[in-house]
Image: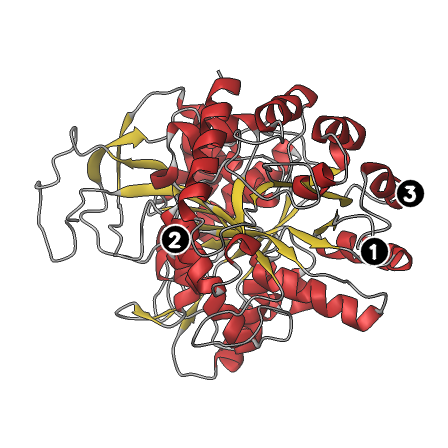
Amino acid sequence: MKATILRCALLLAVAIPTFAASPGLVTPEERARIAQAVPTAAAVTPARPRRLLIFTLNVGYPGHPSIAHASEAFTLMGQKTGAFETVVSDDPAVFERESLRRFDAVFFNNTVGNQFTDPTLRRNLLEFVTGGGGLLGVHGTSAAFTRWPGAAEDWPEFASLLGARGVIHKAADEPITIKLDDPGHPLNRVFAGQDFPYANEFFRFKESYSRDRVRVLLSIDTAKTDLTAGPTRPGLMRADDDYALAWVRHYGLGRVFYSTIGHTPSVFWDAKILQFYLAAVQFALGDLPTPTTPSAKLTPAIRAHEKLGWKLGIEAYTFHKFTFFETIEKTAQLGLPYIGGLNFQKVSKEIPKNFDPALSDEELQQIRMKLEAHSLRLLTFFIQNIPNDEAACRRIFEFGRKMGIETFLSEPKLEALPLIDRFCDEFGINVALHNHAQKASPNYWNPEGVLKACEGRSARIGACADIGYWLRSGIDPLEGARLLKDRLLIVQMHDLHSVAADGHDVPWGTGVGKSAEFLRELHRLGIQPRMIGLEYSYDWFESLPKVAACIEFFNTTTLELAR
């Protein structure tokens, strides 16, 4: 342990004390209590062997006594359930890129202070998460990567990723009533729909926390808790009366969980809390499917989308006459949580360059933070051609990992598909083959051509069906969906005033595109595209009301289907 702490000090290159919890802090009696309380069955069967990194380093702060108990509990949970194995470390070198590849998720175990300032290690952690890794934090993790004492911010994007900053609290045994904000959520099943009393140290979070960005699972029930009891201090009371305790979210492709419940060792021999944390770990590892739409966006229609397994987002081509930042603002104004990008749209007035892999890391960070500020996830990205060149192809997929892109939309040459398929598997990113008309897309213009291109390919290669071009080419969208089935990765939804070559977009349900019938057929077939993209290609500068009408049509239809 001493050698590990020495390595930490060398990497940090500062004279700030570093601390790591010793396993010896858990007494035999406490170990027995933990062993008795940990779950013995996984919430779901893992898709493959999983590995969780438990990181315990505190910098400038001696660390919570519960750190060792949490490490013990999570390690035992993994062993008893067979859901994962753990590696416990306090050495920042574990965040070297090749080291991180060994893990499916990272648990920042009550980590207070500035764990490491090396920009390469920070970039590795960020890209691990945006590229599809998991991140968990409890209690003091809300002060990770801050300068301690005082919790001065040192990495704003980590604060965004986690969902909050804040360490102000009352007593270590503050009595509250915990409310289930989302009783039916998979992580909350252990509580059987029942709010419950609890006593511990509960952090209050700063303005960086918002239900616009996270899916709140647990919070303080202010109607049943006396928040005025005991001593008070500045920052304890929030003007919105919203005191979240635990939440989930996506950051890019990454799955993030945080809970402030973890101050005392007794938390980690509480059987229900451990069951809750087991489900959280399996979510972060990628085995437990979990909705993460931010709480503030959970209208009845969005809940219907979730029930059907559908994600409606704006394709940037709808607003490509504007900058991507303006497209973000318009999408947020429309109330949708998802967006697609494209590589020939200018980023912003401040970044007058195309949104493409040539942008610097600093420019990509500005785009991520703009998306975060408007509570949007970038699910898709159109790039006309992915070349059959190892280095060029890798650059595109590295760009996808940095931006957390789930699916590229592209029209690559057929000979590039073996290389693309290999990178899809390496990076966990899909490629949906986009169609224009037959002349422009000779290989992909119809479903049969896409299916032929997909023969022998992984499930990460499929179709991006542009319904407008299908209609103009005489392809019935319902028949296209029936042919493609699960190869239908992305739908670019259109309704047209005519199926002739000059057919233009009209609000969904008002044209010849059989929009309602198409959505009903998707539902009947059980097809859940990675995104249903709203691409409105008409009245470029006056389309917002018509785009809103398409959303209203989609919401009405999905509410009916989800009954």
Q: Say what amino acid the circle numbered 2 marks.
A: Gly
* Between discs 1 and 3, the one toward the N terminus: 1
Query: Mark 1 = which residue?
Result: 422
Circle 3 residues within 10 Å: few <14, some 14–19, many ≥20: few
Q: Nearer the viewer, residue 158 or 338?
A: 338
Dot 1: element: helix
Where 50 falls versus 481 (above or below)?
Answer: below
Mark whose residue sits in front, 2 or 1? 1
Q: Which mark is residue 163?
A: 2
Residue at image coords 53%, 19%: 561
Residue at image coords 45%, 25%: 556
Q: Is residue 7 visible?
A: no
* Between discs 2 and 1, the one toward the N terminus: 2
Where 15 falls versus 281 (above or below)?
Answer: below
The location of residue 501, given as percent across then percent down, is 71, 44
Q: How many marks?
A: 3
> Can you say which quadrant of the picture contains the N terminus?
bottom right
- CA–CA distance in space, label 2 to label 1: 33 Å
Q: Which mark is residue 456?
A: 3
Residue at image coords 67%, 35%: 82
Q: Say what amino acid the circle numbered 1 marks.
A: Arg
